[in-house]
Amino acid sequence: MSIIITKYILFFLTFLRPFLMSPAFELNEADLIFSIAFIAFSFLYILFLKKFDSKNFAPTVLIFFLTVFTFSLLRHPVSLKHLYVYIFYLSVFYFAFYEEKKRPLLVLIVVTSMAVALYSLRSYFIISRYLLEYLELKEINYGFGREFVQRGRAFAPFFLPSLLGGYLAMAIPICLGFITEEVKLKKRRLFLFFWIICFVCFSLVLYLTQSIGALVALFCAIAFYLILRRKLNLKILILIFILLTVIASVLYIRQSGEDFTKPFFSLEKRLSYWRNTWQIIKDNPFTGKGLGNLSLAQSRFVHNSYLQLWGESGLFSLLAFLAVIFLFIKKGTEKIKAEGRFCEKGVVVAGIVFLIHNLIDFTFFVSQVSFLWWIILAIVLSRDSFGRP
């Protein structure tokens, strides 16, 4: 009984996670309390399961976390304040890794994403106009926030449109996996209808974020899947054309407004951030600056999570994470090439979306989004436990 209660508490906390705003590198009391609760219950859950053994504990992932912990201890004490985020990631990974039935966990992810999409649509169509009135009444000149609302960019419950875009871009392939399975079964029409509604909502909100990075990451991940499956044909080419049209329309919409909302301005800034980060890395290539200590003159974020990880935690932490990625791609490729199990294939594509998006963004460092990556990684690396749909 205790294990069931603990499991459902963890499921409930997983549902809550996207709704708790957590700006990267800023200590947040609510975020800290939530993380401690999740860490405690996941530890109890694994303890109840008695699953941890020397043959099944994902050593590559554990080595990555141990490397980050080790080099954080060598740096400024400020780094220790940020360690709880990585301990939270570790607990999320092992909770999902040892959870025997993965399908309910994926259903929970889609349902949670649907709640996020509906919340965002409500904010977009109803709350945004009152927010603009409030900003004008109080004479608050927060350029980014005002521009997001004025230009019609969805971002709630996250603090940036790109974060919401990155989250939903991962949810879409998982949802497509469920849709494909239901189509193949040709029985459960009610379930198929629900998944299609979810897919439409996710796609609409993703478009409303106007997040070019998330759209490109989703496009590249789907292309990777199609190439591996050798599924390129006329229908797929038409779909690719539609996706490119969507991206082009977002580019056009983003060209109006303030300079900082324009795509090419964003690209120039990112290139500038990367050059500045490289200069910082050259000063501390092996140990890094410490967690939360890497800060640029114009931004707290590098907009490339791999450079950010290197700059904060050092070269060995980056290499350890690249080893995790290699293992994920290796296992994921095997699952994509295998017949059937479309739900698993969707999970792999979702993980690839995350990895590509973090080449130009920083969702890895925002637990509100990245907790989903650690669940995806755990599902791909764990033993077969999906069962029949």
Image: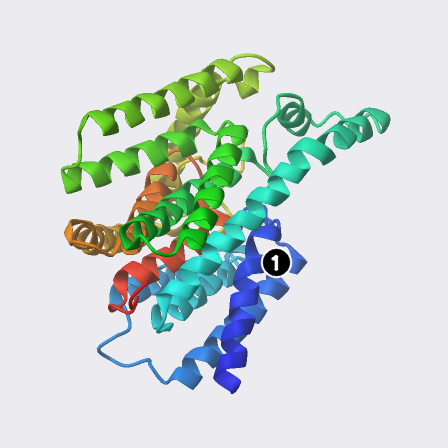
Can residue 315 be seen at all in this image of the molecule?
no
* x and y, in percent, of residue 147 in the image: 64, 23
* x and y, in percent, of residue 63 in the image: 29, 64
Q: How are the residues colored? A: rainbow
Q: Which of 303 and 193 lies nearest the eye of the viewer?
A: 193
- Residue 71 sits in quarter: bottom left
In the image, residue 48 above or below residue 370: below
Q: Image quadrant for the C terminus?
A: bottom left
In the image, residue 185 above or below residue 168: below
* x and y, in percent, of residue 155 in the image: 59, 36
Side of 21 relative to 307 (left or right): right
Which residue corresponds to the image point at 56% horizontal and 57% vertical from the top-left?
A: 17
Which residue corresponds to the image point at 78% horizontal and 28% vertical from the top-left?
A: 135
Q: Secondary structure at mark 1?
A: helix
Can residue 88 be seen at all in this image of the molecule?
yes
In the image, residue 343 above or below residue 296: below
* x and y, in percent, of residue 34 in the image: 60, 64
Q: Which residue, as the protein is rendered here, is positioned at the far right? A: 137
Side of 282 relative to 338 (left or right): right
Side of 224 relative to 14 (left or right): left
Which residue corresponds to the image point at 81% horizontal and 24% vertical from the top-left?
A: 136
Give the tally of numbered discs: 1
Q: Which residue, as the protein is rendered here, is positioned at the far bottom? A: 1
- Residue 233 sits in quarter: top left
Q: Which residue is mark 1?
A: 31
Q: Which of 179 and 151 lies nearest the eye of the viewer?
A: 179
Specify the amino acid type for callout 1: Asp
Answer few, some or many: residues within 10 Å of disc 1's Cα (few below 14, many 20 plus, some between 14 and 19): some
